[in-house]
Amino acid sequence: MKVARDTWLIFERSMFLTLRNPVWIIVGLLQPFLYLVLFGPLLKSIAESTPGFPPGGAFNIFVPGLLIQIALFGAAFVGFGLISEMRSGVVERMRVTPLSRFAMLFGRALRDVVILDVQALVLIVIALPFGLKIDPAGLIVALSLLSLIGLTMAPLSYTLALILKSEDALAPLVTTISLPLLLLSGILLPLTLAPDWLQTVAKINPLSHAVDAIRALFNGHFGDPSVGFGVGLMAILALIALGVASRTFGRSAA
Amino acid sequence: MTIDPTASSIIRTRDLRKRFKGRGGTVEAVKGVDLDVRAGEIFGFLGPNGAGKTTTLRMLATLIPPTSGEANVAGVDLLRDPAKVRQQIGYVAQGGGSDPLMTGRGELVIQGRLFGMSRKQAEARATEVLAALDLTEAAGRTTGTYSGGMRRRLDIGMGMVHQPKLLFLDEPTTGLDPQARANLWDEVRKLRDGGTTIFLTTHYLEEADILCDRVAIIDHGTIVAEGTPAELKKAIAGDVITLGIAEHERVLTLVRAEPYVREANDQDEDGLVRLYVDEGDRALPQLLRLLDDAGLPPQTIALSRPSLDDVFLRKTGRSLRETAA
């Protein structure tokens, strides 16, 4: 099928270019790694003495948050790469080919998802000696959920890049959007510690549901309602984001 | 090379328009362009910056949709089926389109595959194109290491990798040194001789004059002149022959009787006789013979030709050299 073939072409090319400069993959891992090593141990002692901290071990609470952070920030900034491809004329050159517009987007987004899943796996392996315990089947579903977050954030980042066409405009906007998403998802500390109003606000943030789902999955609680809700919600958001972004790629004036 | 006037149009536009909505209101960048580009020619689209030439090119290359009008590109209705147009054309943007981290060969192979070739076919075609453009040695290097002329040749290679009937080149030689420019002209001629129609924009008059079979001049969003460079120049003034000669009255009477002389006078203060003729290079030998036979040999004789700039000047009241600077 043409769309699948085109998607593979774009995936292959963008992955090749990413791997030519793999330092960014490592840089993307650095921040969550530092949180894990330098902040995680603090959390461990807090978890043991704080009432209201959910059960399941400090790292089972903390690492899912870091994974969301990888997915969120890893994908939110992919638009920068697209802007440099627009500047070098590659995007315009490909627009005047029969290449499927959806594949222009989806091939890149798949590359982003593979990168962030690999980063997530690396972080999980590093976290195991700290006391992270994961259910293997839960891990697979959790990675799929992270992929859905990537498939939501990356297309949005590409859409903004196509519209703004400038790093200077994209950087503050992406930061402004991602920081509250991050803080309101209970990534660093569980939101069970939060006052009622903050918990209510956080419920609007889809990522808080994703964090809940990943925590349940790591503990092997597939029946937990947060799993179905988190996965379902992110799947819907990913579909919407892909739809919006492929329309923007398709509008020839963009 | 002469163009068969009965050859079919590969680009045909009627009343093609493009309006942009901006903060300061609506701007009509292209105001009703009628173009007929014949199959197999190098067609130059000439005009100062901001005249609408890149906007027209981008419409024809499916990058921006026209606001209104009709356009048929490579046998396909542009407004109805831009996707089908894309299969038929090649496009080389002004700034190029290669990734500095990809090798020249890598870019050609992916470009071929984007047009539906298998990896094997694309590899074989890339080898051909690299050889044709004298890039074989640089094929394995990343394009970031290429010189301006090499990168431009690679861009053209990407535009022709799928052997399109019609190739669009936006300002192909801007920023190149004279040597690289001349090389590129040769490549473009080779493509034309191989059967590809070339539509290029330029603001270099000599490029339009030397390279293009036919040109159209656009100014303020409308076509102000169209034809072969020679036709356009001829329509404007004809060539000028300047004679340093005695017995002006006899000379003027003599030459005014000749069919190829449009006008003759000695009004200028320099004391020279000026003849305006259709084709100076044909007229000159005839004129010399005529004057010799009449026993009126000239002391000096000079032939000068109007440039496309004279054409532009006459049509728009401005010199293109000034506006393009």
Image (tube, rainbow, N blue to C red):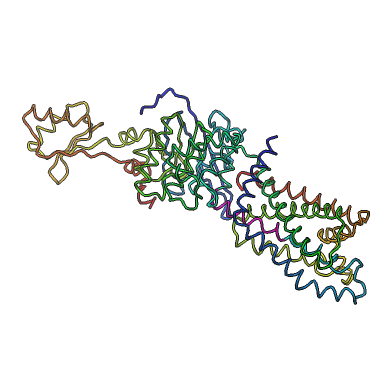
Q: Front-most of B6 and B187?
A: B187
In the rendering, at what x and y percent does residue B42 appear?
42, 34
Judged left or right of residue A88, residue A49 is right
Q: Give the range drawn in magenta.
A: A73-89
In the rendering, at what x and y percent does residue B222 appear?
46, 40
Residue sticking out furthest to the left: B295
**Residue drawn 73% across the image and 66% down it:** A33
Residue A79 within the segment the image draws in magenta = yes
- Is residue B318 at all visible to an observer of this figure? no
**Residue drawn 15% across the image and 38% down it:** B301
The answer to whether residue A5 is above or below residue A66 is above
The quarter of the rendered structure image containing the N terminus of chain B is top left
Q: Quadrant of residue B272?
A: top left
Q: In which quarter of the image is residue A34?
A: bottom right
**Residue drawn 34% across the image and 42% down it:** B206
Residue sticking out furthest to the front: A129
Q: Front-most of B3 and A89?
A: A89
Judged left or right of residue B153, residue B232 is left
**Residue drawn 60% across the image and 32% down it:** B84
Residue sticking out furthest to the top: B6
- Is residue A214 at all visible to an observer of this figure? yes
In the rendering, at what x and y percent does residue B320 appear?
36, 47
Judged by its main secondary structure, the magenta piece is helix
Judged left or right of residue B276, residue A249 is right
In the rendering, at what x and y percent does residue A1 appear?
70, 34
The answer to whether residue B99 is above or below residue A99 is below
Q: Front-most of B28 and A152?
A: A152
The answer to whether residue B259 is above or below residue B219 is above
Residue A194 within the segment the image draws in magenta = no
